[in-house]
């Protein structure tokens, strides 16, 4: 079993060794210095931050169409994912999520959190619908197609919003500002997708709890979930937002989108107007009466 | 007669002639042999042999002990059979009278099974697992067998008059299918990942079978 980590370092080693091969053929003083510089670079890379250097060098070599190119986005261990998930539900001022993400934004978390959320919402939406109709005599049937609605909403949210935010941050940040000299304060699009993906995690347990049919509890959960993951989002993005000219507008936009998402989930998948069971029979009655009126008249004309 | 032929064509191609004279030895030979020939055998033998290979793999899934057969000689016939069967049972009827029963359509089950197993495979590839693409798709497809069995049992239970007790039995059966399928696929695929990433690879597999088990439990008449 070849480890992923070992392959790039091997390649790097052989890459760095090429000059030394030349040196052995033509021993010159200047060439010898070059080798030393290379070695020093490599050691400093390995010493601090290590993997970043290796990853960028590796991604530069891989083609866009190979699996190896995308492996850099999944280069993550179980413990990292657990840490990031925990960080995404514990709002702290020192924004630990940012520290976690700054090194290597991954796509594993966002993708699987989104997919899990889609099916959790679809399943517990069905459970909620069942509970609403539990006491009536309606023959309840599940609705598989909640999956497609949930998938559309969540994938749109987790891709469109980060890209929009990334564009707005690029457009509105004051680069001339003193703080703007720190070039990597503004997060990249990938990092934003990662942050947003992890911020959806809290909706997974919440959507299970939403199937409990108490309206106050449901709305309370909406607010709590929005507050927790929204504040994590804000704390994580705050350094970048501070540079923006329209920071109030952006902050309000982020919170509003998050709130709309949560409220939309609750309204669409878990909410039913209380007198829907009265409506259904009435509709049926109307249909049957219309039929009984229309059919005889057709018969008489035909 | 043989000897004269050989003498006649000796300078041209003695080898081909020699083989064509021998009939009726091929049927009893094994698959791996170099001179194995399926052209002469009846079509029934061919189909039965392939079905037997699929059946042996099914047995390996149900009693996951030996993993060479499923991983070395992968095929997609078993997954195709299982997937088609499940999709046929699970598809919702589209009657106009009751406005459809909300079940998935045939193609949707098909897409969930195939695209789902491909996504799960791609995930383990991206995490750095050393397993080939179709091996993994094959294993994931074959491990649908416990959920298919659960579906058959649930379908039989549905024939009876429904009560809460029967719903609980259906729930237990489909959960058993889910755990069985996840366990079997973990036995086959678990070694392909590094230990500190095993959970990351196993979770999507579990999710995949959980979704299919949800379809099984939700299926009503």
Image: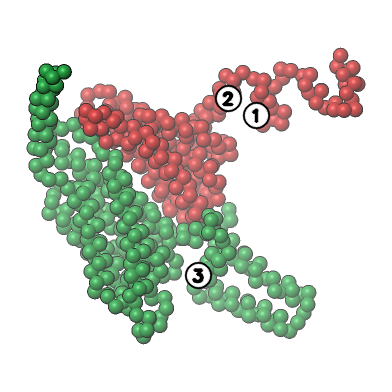
Chain colours: A green, B red
Q: Residue at x 78, y 23 (%)?
A: B19
Can see residue B179?
no
**Which residue corresponds to mark 1?**
B31
User: How far is mark 2 from mark 1, CA to CA?
Assistant: 10 Å
Quadrant assignment for the C terminus of chain B: top left
Q: Where is residue B61 drawn, in percent x and y?
A: 48, 35
Q: Which mark is residue A165?
A: none
Residue depicted at 42% across the width and 75% down the height: A184
Is B92 located above or below residue A172 in the figure?
Answer: above
**Labels 2 and 3 share a subunit:** no
Answer few, some or many: residues within 10 Å of disc 3's Cα (few below 14, many 20 plus, some between 14 and 19). Answer: some
Q: Chain of mark 1?
A: B
Q: Residues under labels 1 and 3: Cα distance?
A: 50 Å
Q: Are marks 2 and 1 in contact (CB under 8 Å)?
A: yes
Residue A252: where, in percent of width, then height? 23, 69
Name which residue lies at 59% across and 77% down. Answer: A41
Q: Which residue is mark 3?
A: A52
Foreground pick, A54 / B182: A54
Q: For the residue labelled by badge 3, is the local secondary structure a helix, a strand or a loop? A: helix
């Amino acid at each position: 079993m070849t480890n992923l980590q070992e392959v790039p370092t091997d390649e790097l080693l052989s890459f760095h060794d090429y000059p030394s091969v030349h040196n052995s053929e033509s021993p010159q003083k200047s060439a010898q210095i070059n080798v030393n510089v290379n070695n020093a670079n490599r050691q400093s890379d390995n010493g601090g931050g290590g993997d970043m250097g290796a990853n960028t060098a590796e991604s530069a070599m891989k083609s866009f169409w190979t699996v190896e190119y995308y492996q850099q986005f999944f280069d993550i261990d179980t413990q990292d994912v657990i840490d990031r998930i925990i960080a995404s539900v514990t709002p702290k001022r020192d924004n630990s999520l940012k520290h976690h993400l700054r090194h290597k934004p991954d796509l594993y978390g966002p993708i699987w959190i989104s997919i899990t959320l889609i099916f959790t919402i679809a399943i517990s939406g069905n459970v909620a619908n069942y509970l609403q109709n539990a006491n009536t005599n309606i023959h309840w049937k599940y609705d598989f197609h909640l999956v497609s609605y949930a998938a559309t909403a969540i994938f749109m949210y987790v891709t469109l919003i980060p890209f929009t935010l990334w564009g707005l941050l690029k457009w509105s940040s004051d680069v001339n500002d003193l703080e703007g000299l720190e070039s990597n304060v503004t997060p990249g699009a990938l990092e934003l997708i990662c942050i947003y993906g992890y911020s959806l995690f809290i909706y997974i347990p919440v959507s299970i709890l939403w199937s409990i049919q108490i309206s106050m509890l449901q709305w309370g959960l909406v607010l709590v979930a929005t507050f927790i993951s929204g504040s994590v989002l804000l704390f994580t993005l705050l350094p970048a937002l501070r540079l923006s000219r329209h920071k109030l507008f952006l902050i309000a936009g982020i919170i509003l989108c998050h709130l709309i998402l949560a409220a939309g989930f609750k309204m669409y998948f878990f909410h039913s107007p209380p007198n829907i069971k009265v409506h259904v029979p009435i509709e049926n009655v109307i249909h049957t009466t219309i039929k009984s009126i229309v059919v005889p008249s057709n018969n008489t004309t035909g | 007669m043989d000897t004269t032929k050989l003498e006649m064509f000796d300078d041209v191609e003695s080898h081909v002639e020699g083989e064509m004279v021998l009939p009726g030895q091929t049927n009893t030979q094994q698959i791996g042999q170099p001179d194995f020939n399926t052209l002469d055998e009846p079509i029934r033998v061919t189909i039965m042999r392939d079905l037997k290979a699929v059946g042996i793999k099914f047995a390996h899934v149900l009693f996951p002990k030996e993993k060479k057969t499923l991983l070395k000689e992968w095929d997609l016939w078993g997954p195709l059979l299982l997937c088609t069967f499940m999709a046929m049972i699970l598809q919702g009827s589209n009657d106009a009278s009751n406005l459809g029963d909300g079940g998935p359509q045939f193609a949707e089950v098909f897409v969930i099974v195939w695209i789902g197993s491909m996504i799960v495979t791609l995930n383990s590839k991206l995490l750095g697992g050393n397993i080939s693409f179709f091996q993994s798709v094959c294993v994931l497809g074959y491990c649908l067998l416990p959920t298919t069995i659960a579906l058959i049992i649930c379908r039989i239970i549905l024939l009876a008059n429904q009560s809460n007790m029967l719903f609980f039995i259906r729930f237990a059966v489909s959960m058993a299918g889910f755990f069985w399928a996840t366990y079997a696929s973990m036995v086959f695929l678990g070694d392909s990942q590094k230990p500190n990433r095993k959970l990351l690879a196993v979770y999507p597999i579990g999710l995949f079978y959980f979704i299919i088990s949800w379809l099984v439990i939700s299926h009503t008449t």
